[in-house]
């Protein structure tokens, strides 16, 4: 990416699900009651889940207006629907009544959101779940994996196993030549770009011999080393759905639904570049920063500006998590004594991270 390039603009609905593991987020951020949280909206799942930790406020910001409208839709739906109706409207459960459910939701949407969703009847009719550009790619990839591996192998993959049995199943059954071939065909720069993720976003620069090899290595960890039981990300990648009601994000569990509904007013949504938005905030006004991998959409110059804004707006004990997908980004050298990487915690959450696509998941503490 050229140094002078500004943050890459996005306008299509790229994500309808979060692909950042919320367990990693909470391990790094340790959101406490009364905390002020800054988060990238993306698929809005993690933002809604953060409400369970009782923050004072969540500033949910995204450069892509489509992601902001997704959050507005999810919040409006939670306000007016009961839990089972929300599952039906979202597409997680079957429904022939989504248009009627949307008629109840629509009056709660702001004017911009109403205009946005008026032009997306297909997504409303099918349910927004797994219906963004990236999710459509995931569904195709999952079908291709099932075709190459066979339904029997996929079903046995999710059978209960010890850690040793899981390793052996991967080594002896799953890790076939066909599985390797999959990454050359599907997990490449051109294919990912065609599914809505702009080509500038994907650069191979992580030490592997090829782009496909990099994603193969990451998948190996998820299939072999991380417990498959409870990893809803892996089930989504292979089947396009959750395995059961227990293996879902926290905001999609029945016991949490009413609490989340009662705290929705704590979310303030906005569409803006992260650094520009932070420039509007006061000093030491934020306690937790969930940055996703937005630095990869920026030049190194803009990355420095962003982290300077993070440091200025961070409280004295603030925590930060951010990720790299492909392009290596790090806290600028001049700020490394002020935004301090927790090396041990970063290694732990990197290894345990259930959403295996990220090349780096790292935790930082603010030192003031």
Image (cartoon, grey):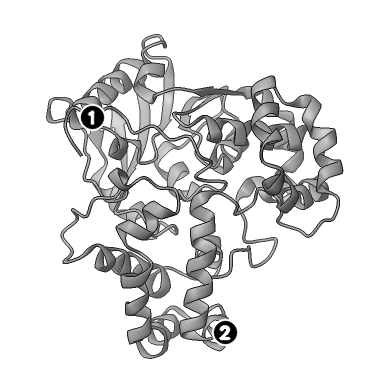
Viewer-proximal residue among 228 and 280? 280
For marks 2 and 1 on the same chain, the one whose residue lies earlier in the sequence: 1
Occupied quadrant, residue 170: bottom left
Relative height, residue 275 to residue 345 (above, below)? above
Quadrant assignment for the C terminus: top left
Label 2's element? Answer: helix
Instruction: Give the residue at mark 1.
Output: 5
Q: Residue at x 64, y 23 (%)?
A: 112
Question: Where is the N terminus found, in terms of image quarters?
Answer: top left
Badge number at residue 151: 2
**81 relative to 121 in the view: left or right:** right
Q: Nearer the viewer, mark 2 or mark 1?
A: 1
Q: Name the residue rendered at 53%, 73% in the picture.
A: 143
Looking at the image, residue 267 lies above or below residue 295: above
Front residue of this view, candidates 285 and 220: 220
In the picture, measured across the screen, residue 345 lies left or right of residue 51, that is: left
Residue 149 percent across, percent down from the top left: 47, 84
Mark 1, secondary structure of its residue: loop
On the rendered structure, is 172 left or right of 153? left
Q: Is residue 367 visible?
A: no
> Could you tell me which residue is drawn at 39 percent across and 35 percent down?
291
Q: Position of residue 39 (x, y in %)?
A: 47, 31
Can I make out residue 169 in this image? yes
- Give how far apart the Cα atoms at labels 2 and 1 are: 45 Å
- Identify the residue at image location x=85%, y=55%: 96
> Dot 2: within a 10 Å radius of its alpha carbon, few (fewer than 14), some, or many (20 or more) residues?
few
Q: Is residue 95 above or below residue 309?
A: below
Say few, some or many: other residues with alpha carbon within 10 Å of mark 1 (under 14 / 14 to 19 / 20 or more): few
Give the camera-side residue of 274 and 96: 96
Viewer-nearest residue: 313 or 85: 85
């Amino acid at each position: 990416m050229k140094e002078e390039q500004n943050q890459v603009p996005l306008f299509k609905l790229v994500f309808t699900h979060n692909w950042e593991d919320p367990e990693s987020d909470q391990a790094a951020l340790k959101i406490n009651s009364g905390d002020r949280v800054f988060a990238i909206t993306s698929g809005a799942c993690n933002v809604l889940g953060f409400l369970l930790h009782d923050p004072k406020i969540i500033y949910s910001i995204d450069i892509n207006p489509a992601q902001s409208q997704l959050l507005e839709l999810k919040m409006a739906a939670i306000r007016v629907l009961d839990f089972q109706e929300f599952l039906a409207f979202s597409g997680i459960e079957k429904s022939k009544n989504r248009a009627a459910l949307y008629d109840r939701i629509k009056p709660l949407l702001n004017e911009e959101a109403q205009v946005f969703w008026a032009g997306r009847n297909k997504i409303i009719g099918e349910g927004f779940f797994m219906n963004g550009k990236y999710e459509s790619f995931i569904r195709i990839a999952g079908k291709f994996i099932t075709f190459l591996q066979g339904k029997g192998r996929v079903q046995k993959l999710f059978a209960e196993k010890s850690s040793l049995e899981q390793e052996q199943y991967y080594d002896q059954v799953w890790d076939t030549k066909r599985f390797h071939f999959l990454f050359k065909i599907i997990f490449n720069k051109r294919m990912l770009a065609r599914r809505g993720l702009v080509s500038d976003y994907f650069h191979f620069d992580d030490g592997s011999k090829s782009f496909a090899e990099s994603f193969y290595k990451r998948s190996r960890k998820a299939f072999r080393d991380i417990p498959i039981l409870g990893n809803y990300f892996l089930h989504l990648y292979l089947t396009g759905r959750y395995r059961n009601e227990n293996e879902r994000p926290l905001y999609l569990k029945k016991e949490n639904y009413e609490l989340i509904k009662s705290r929705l007013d704590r979310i303030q949504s906005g569409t803006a570049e992260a650094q520009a938005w932070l420039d509007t905030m006061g000093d030491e006004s934020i306690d937790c920063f969930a940055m996703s991998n937005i630095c990869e959409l920026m030049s190194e110059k803009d990355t420095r500006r962003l982290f300077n804004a993070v440091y200025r707006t961070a409280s004295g004990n603030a925590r930060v998590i951010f990720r790299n997908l492909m392009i290596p980004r790090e806290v600028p050298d001049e700020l490394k004594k002020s935004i301090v990487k927790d090396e041990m915690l970063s290694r732990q959450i990197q290894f345990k991270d259930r959403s295996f696509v990220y090349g780096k998941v790292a935790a930082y503490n603010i030192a003031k």
